[in-house]
Amino acid sequence: MFKVNNNDIYMTEHDYNVALPITINGAEFDSTDSVKIVIKKNDEVVLEKIYNEIQDNTFNFILSETESELLPLGHYFYHMDWYEDGAFRDCIVEKAKFIVTDKV
């Protein structure tokens, strides 16, 4: 399960195939645009995902089982960038928390 507080994302450990719709305000995306999310721990990249299917400024952040296993319980940070035709356009989220929590 995902929870969002401001730009901080909280995820339950071992969750996968759960969609977190992310809407980006103040931008107009074309069919050739993409969003890249990079999750880091201690400045080391743990996971990098690129989303090309953006409709009405929204895409679904989804982790596979394999990707979820890369994120054990702990505190991470992520940033989100906008690419236009494969070239960097803008930083959407410069640095926010990505916290993996224990199952309830």
Image (tube, rainbow, N blue to C red):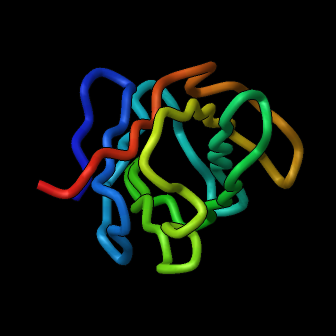
| 49 left or right, relative to 29 | right
Which residue is rendered at x = 59% and y = 34% of the image? 78
For the image shown, how many numbered marks are present on the structure? Answer: 0
| Image location of residue 65, percent across then percent down | 48, 80
Q: Quadrant of the C terminus?
A: bottom left
Which residue is rendered at x = 57% and y = 30% of the image? 77
| 84 left or right, relative to 4 | right
Which residue is rendered at x = 57% and y = 47% of the image? 29
In this orientation, which residue lies closer to the viewer: 16 or 19?
16
In this orientation, which residue lies closer to the viewer: 94 or 53?
94
| 83 left or right, relative to 18 | right
| Image location of residue 25, percent across then percent down | 40, 29
For residue 98, above or below residue 69: above
Q: Quadrant of the N terminus?
A: bottom left
| Image location of residue 43, percent across then percent down | 77, 29
In this orientation, which residue lies closer to the viewer: 65 or 27?
65
Which residue is rendered at x = 49% and y = 77% of the image? 64
Which residue ends up furthest to the right in the rendered image?
Answer: 87
| 35 left or right, relative to 63 | right
For residue 78, above or below residue 60: above
| Image location of residue 17, percent across then percent down | 36, 77
